[in-house]
């Protein structure tokens, strides 16, 4: 259960929060108690400190509090936040101090030892904290009427500036006059400017009797944040608000040990519950991971069993076919080495066509393309000539390369004279030699040169003009050969 103890010079009343609302009760409370005081000597003041760090600033303000309120321990301070710069956020200079200077009644209540005190809030600071809600104007008079008593608190730019408690009859005319008297005082002291329009007033009571007088006095009555109206006791919204433990608490720690210990105990229990939930979550995650690993292992075992069954079926099929596995392996190796590796003929024919196409009058009379077997000499070259060629090019691997032998015979027009024939043969030989990795074994140009004019006569002009060369199985692009042939 939650309780609020209301203390004033003329009243001591304990209130209990129930599901139906607030109820005035008697006896000893069984739960924590929030104490709200309404004493005439509640004080609010503003002080300015140098730019100090947090520890030094706190010590400075504590000394100022002890100097300003030496006779009471029920004191405190807050830092205004509205409009603060970044520097003021870290090293503020403005501080609002507050205190309850009459300590006798509070000491007697807290000294009984039968209260679990959650804190003590002066009604002035409770009203100020209530007025800091964003839906309310920043400059605001908060007016709380009592039994022939009127409490007025003024906020300027959401900062408490003044609190007053006056003996005022519960009549609208007297209450409005007291508010106007407070406005006049603030104007005379320079806190308020003159002729600034209507002053905002939040009245904790029935506003209907005050509306006409307030409008005539340039006072604007402000609606309550939650639309409160027609309450039998307008202190109840403040009791509801104090249960949030807002700013303005003034009780020393020795009077709040039970409440603070209970809060710490609850925080420890919440932390322990969080750790427990985290442990359960981690354990659940590990358990889920174990289940996943077990499922994966079962799936892998099922896959292995399926593969083993397939292998057994293959073995049975091979046994039924009565074919030796070594024979199958030899056939696969033969296919890989002799059949699938046979180069495509069109690449070599395209390269030869690019060389011959340079002269449209040329005709290929005979063409042979064959894949040389391993160890076979190309173009009917003798072993002596092969040895001589290898000696001339020791880095070549002519005898072991898997190559293509390409031989062809060319038919030249009868109208070509010796010069044209020589030029044509030279162009053809140069184009063939420019083919990637090509090696010419039989060259018509060399034979033609050997049969050129000798001793004033021409011989062997009717010999056939044929070439025989070897090319790699995978022929690179023949761009270079085409350029030479052109």
Image: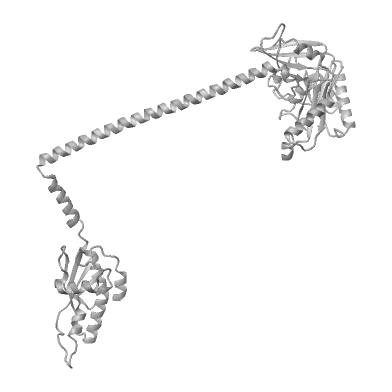
| Nearer to me, 2 or 202 | 2
Quarter of the image with the N terminus is: top right
Image quadrant assignment for residue 270 = top right
Residue 389 x, y percent position in the rendering: 21, 73
Residue at 72% of width from left, 18% of height from top? 254
Asked if one can make out residue 345 in the rendered structure from this viewpoint, the answer is yes
Q: Quadrant of the C terminus?
A: bottom left
In the depicted view, which residue is nearer to us: 210 or 157?
157
Residue 68 picture location, percent across and down: 84, 26
Q: Is residue 313 left or right of residue 131?
A: left
Q: Is residue 311 placed above or below 224 in the rendered structure?
A: below
Residue at 85% of width from left, 33% of height from top? 192
Rendered position, 340 above or below 199 = below
Question: Residue at position x 20%, y 85% from top?
Answer: 415
Q: Is residue 481 above or below residue 418?
A: above
Question: What is the x, y in percent for residue 247?
Answer: 73, 25
Camera-side residue of 260 and 453:
260
């Amino acid at each position: 259960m939650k309780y609020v103890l209301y203390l004033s010079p003329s009243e001591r009343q304990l209130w209990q929060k129930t599901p139906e609302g607030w109820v005035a009760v008697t006896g000893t409370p069984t739960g924590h108690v929030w104490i709200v005081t309404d004493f005439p000597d509640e004080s609010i003041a503003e002080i300015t400190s140098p730019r100090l760090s947090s520890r030094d600033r706190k010590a400075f303000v504590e000394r100022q509090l002890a100097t300003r309120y030496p006779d009471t321990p029920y004191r405190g301070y807050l830092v205004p936040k509205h409009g603060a710069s970044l520097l003021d956020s870290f090293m503020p200079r403005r501080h609002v101090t507050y205190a309850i200077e009459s300590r006798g009644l509070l000491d007697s209540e807290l000294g009984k030892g039968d209260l679990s005190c959650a804190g003590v809030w002066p009604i002035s600071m409770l009203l100020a904290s209530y007025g800091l809600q964003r839906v309310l104007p920043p400059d605001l008079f908060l007016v709380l009427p009592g039994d022939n008593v009127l409490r007025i608190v003024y906020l300027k730019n959401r900062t408490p500036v003044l609190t007053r408690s006056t003996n005022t009859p519960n009549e609208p005319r007297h209450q409005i006059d007291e508010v106007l008297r407070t406005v006049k005082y603030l104007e005379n002291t320079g806190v308020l400017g003159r002729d600034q329009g209507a002053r905002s007033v939040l009245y904790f009571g029935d506003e209907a009797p005050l509306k006409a007088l307030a409008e005539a006095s340039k006072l604007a009555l402000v609606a309550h944040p939650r639309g409160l109206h027609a309450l039998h006791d307008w202190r109840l919204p403040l009791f509801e608000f104090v249960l949030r433990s807002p700013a303005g608490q003034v009780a020393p720690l020795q009077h709040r040990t039970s409440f603070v210990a209970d809060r710490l105990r609850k925080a420890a229990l919440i932390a322990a519950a969080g750790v427990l939930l985290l442990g359960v979550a981690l354990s659940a995650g590990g358990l889920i991971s174990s289940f996943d690993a077990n499922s994966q292992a079962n799936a892998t075992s099922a896959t292995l069993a399926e593969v083993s069954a397939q292998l057994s079926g293959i073995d049975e099929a091979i046994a039924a076919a009565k074919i030796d596995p070594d024979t199958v392996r030899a056939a696969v190796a033969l296919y890989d080495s002799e059949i699938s590796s046979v180069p495509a003929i069109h690449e070599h024919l395209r390269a030869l066509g690019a060389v011959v196409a340079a002269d449209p009058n040329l005709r290929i009379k005979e063409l042979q393309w064959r894949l040389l077997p391993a160890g076979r000499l190309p173009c009917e070259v003798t072993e002596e000539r092969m040895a001589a060629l290898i000696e001339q090019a020791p880095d070549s691997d002519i005898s072991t390369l898997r190559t293509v032998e390409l031989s062809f015979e060319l038919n030249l027009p009868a109208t070509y004279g010796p010069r044209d024939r020589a030029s044509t043969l030279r162009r053809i030989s140069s184009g063939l030699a420019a083919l990637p990795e090509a090696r010419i074994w039989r060259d018509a140009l060399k034979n033609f040169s050997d049969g050129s004019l000798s001793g004033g006569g021409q011989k062997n002009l009717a010999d056939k003009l044929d070439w025989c060369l070897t090319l790699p199985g995978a022929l690179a692009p023949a761009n270079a050969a085409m350029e030479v042939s052109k």
